[in-house]
Each structure stands twice: as structure tokens, then as C-alpha cells.
Image: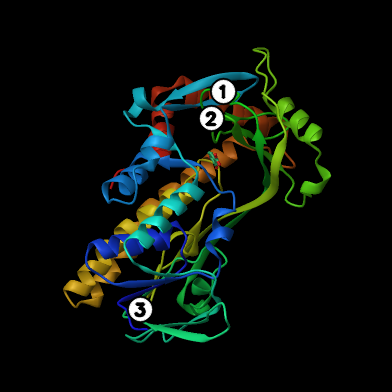
Amino acid sequence: TRTTVGIVGAGPAGLMLSHLLARAGIESVVVDNRTRAQIEGTSRAGILEADSVRLLTDTGVSDRVLREGRRHAGIELRFEGAGHRIDFQELVGESVWLYPQTDVFTDLADARERDGADVRFGIAGTRVVDLTTERPGILFDDADGRPHEVRCDILVGADGAHGVCRSAVPEASRTHHFRAYPFAWFGVLVEAPPSAPELVYTHSRRGFALISQRTETVQRMYFQCDPDEDPADWSDDRIWSELQARVDGPDGFSLKEGPVTDRSVLRFRSLVCEPMRYGSMLLAGDAAHTVPPTGAKGLNLALADVRVLAEAVESAVRGRDRGALDTYGPRALRRVWRAQHFSYWMTSMLHRLPDATEFDVRRQLGELAAVVDSAAGSTYLAEAYTGWPG
Ligand code: DHB
């Protein structure tokens, strides 16, 4: 197959890019080794920045987010057993939307199918080749084991943190900026009504907890745990008593409990791969960078990447000037590093280090008090959480 842009990875980044390129009259082929059902069955984050929502609605992907998503005009920061609301609308005039990433994926996959795009799920053995030429290729086998080859002018790696594209860049041609964290999140889906009107980000001496939501009857919650924790060791009762212990306080905040239907441990880290281009291949989304989940920036960054990337590809294709591709990385990285800082900051402010001293805990409480008591502090949080313009 010959196409203009070959895209590895049919997650939100790859599909949104293919959609934006199609609107600009540029052909693409998207491949993914997962099936649609596998992607739709994986729990991911749930918060969209206002610009991410606008990208979905204004470019004609879907307006389902406006009908089924829930607008959140703030969050609660909870520490020492008391809640403090950060009012995004009042501070920066923006909101975020609770709308799961799996629904974003479904909307994009449906839109690409509706528009007759070439998207191939469930393939195997993907390799990318000839990246330093003007005719790079994606080689793979289809579900029946038959070999295929997609040749393109520009190849985009949107295949996630563990994909083949980033590792196809020789080590001498990339720098990895990396940070590990000595903890993970235990994530659960539960059948219960919401416990609070908005998301609750909790600092406690037992560690971080996040009370998030999905629908009127299903909620998403996380608590900080050891990276080696085994989900099988956690009964429903044990999960609920740990979550409740972390949010306990004099105000009597009490979680609404119900059956736990999904449990998993999410390890997390920070990573940025620079540059985001190698020859004719550009990296986007988690293939180029990973953030810790605190603050839900991962999906939003991926969508912001491909908005900039689509423009660079359009200039390169229309102007027959591959140099236009060089504008992508530096533009995208400005946002990436802000989001890296924000995710790191929220993480370090709210989580308990394994060897935390009383000094460390008091310092965090001082920082939290400074944020919630100061218009400047709260405004920074609100600006970063709802998303930077541009
Ligand atoms: C969710 C995940 C996050 O990392 C976050 O900061 C907020 C919400 C979620 O899955 O709902």
C-alpha cells in the first residue's frame, strides 16, 4: 500500500491525526496490533481539557462528549481531613470534562470508519523501516499471518510508551529524560453512586487517594500503593477500608461503597524523548513522552501533539518542504515540559515518599495550604489543570 502518512498506533493520538489530515485532504493509513475490543476494554483516564473537547466537537469527530460528558468547574484538594475547593471557573473561566478516554477512542474509531478511513486493527509483528529515507515503511502481518507493507512519505509513531517506533530510533540519535517514582496507583472501578460532586485529590499520612467518577452508578478511584502490590491480595473490604482511611476527617466525609468490578496497579514514571523527529518519522503522544497520572495530562498532551503535528505535516505536504516537519517538535515540547512539571508537582505535593520524614509531610502541608490560600497558587493550578492555550 502507498499512502502519504503512515501512522503506527490507533489510539486517540493516531486516530485524531488521521482525522485531522483527512480534513486537510491528506491520505493516511493507521495500523495497530490491538483489536478495537482490546483497546475499548482497557481502563484509562477520564478528564478532558476544554481544548481537547473543542478539538473533538469543532472538527466533527462527535458531539457525544457534550451530551454524555460532565462538565467539572473545579476540583477539591483534601488534606488534614478537610476539603478545599479550587474553582476553575472563577479563577480562569474554564472547566474540564469528565469523559473517559475509552469513549474518546470509540468516537474517533467510529468517525474514521464513517469517513471510510484505512484503519487496520489486530495486526501483528509491526516493524518500521527506512526511516532516514524519503520512503519509510511499516511492515506487518495481518490477522491471517499474511505479510503487508505500507510505504509512505511521512511516518508517525503514535504507538504508546512501549511501542516499536521510539525504540527504532538509534540511541545516539535521541535523549531520554527519565524519572522513576517509588510508588504506583491502585485503580478500581466500583458500582456505587458518586461520593462527592467533583473529583477529590487527597493528601494523607497513609498516602494519596483520588476519588474520581464515571457515571451515576459507576465510580473510578485510585490510591497510592507499592509498585509491587498484587491486586489479588485486595478484597473489596480491604480496598474500601484503605480508601476510607485516606479520606477520613473531622467533617465525616464518607465514601459510598459498592462492589469493586475492576482492580489494577498502574506503575508510573516521567519520560520525554528528544527530539521528537528522526528522519522521516515523527513521534506523538505516549510514544514520545509519558507523564505520571496525577492531573490527567496524558491524553490531553497526545491530542495537543497531533493538533500541532497535523499543521506541520500539512505545510510539508502542500509546500513540498520536509523542513516544515522541524517546527513540530519544538512547538509540542513547550507544552510537554509544562505538563511534565505540572504532573510531577501534583504528584510530589500529594504522595507520600516511602522514607518520608515528619519534615517532608509538614512541608507538603505547607505547600498545599499556600496553594489553596493564595489566589496566585490556586490560579496556577487551575490554569495548568484546565490546559494552556495554543
Ligand atoms: C482520572 C485520572 C487521573 O489521573 C486524574 O488526575 C483525574 C481523573 C480518572 O481516571 O478519572
Residue 56, percent from left and from top: 34, 48
Which mark sits nearer the N-terminus, 2 or 3?
Answer: 2
Assign ligand 1 to one image quadrant: top right
Q: Amino acid at mark 1?
A: Ala
Separation of marks 1 and 2 at Cα, in angstroms:
7 Å
Q: Compare residues 168 and 9 and report the one nearer the observer.
A: 9
The residue lying at 33 percent from left, 72 percent from top is 28
* Circle 1 residues within 10 Å: few <14, some 14–19, many ≥20: some
Separation of marks 2 and 3 at Cα, in angstroms:
42 Å
- Whether residue 32 appears in this view of the structure is yes
Q: Which mark is residue 10?
A: none
Residue 135 falls left or right of residue 268: left
Quarter of image, res 163: bottom right
Q: Compare residues 201 and 80 and report the one nearer the observer.
A: 201
Q: Amino acid at mark 3?
A: Ser
Q: Is residue 381 above or below residue 321?
A: above
Secondary structure under tag 3 reads loop
Residue position for label 2: 199
Number of numbered labels in the structure image: 3
Secondary structure under tag 2 reads loop
Which quadrant holds the N terminus? bottom left
Q: Is mark 2 within 8 Å of ligand 1?
A: yes
- Whether residue 388 appears in this view of the structure is no
Q: Which mark is residue 196?
A: 1
Residue position for label 3: 280
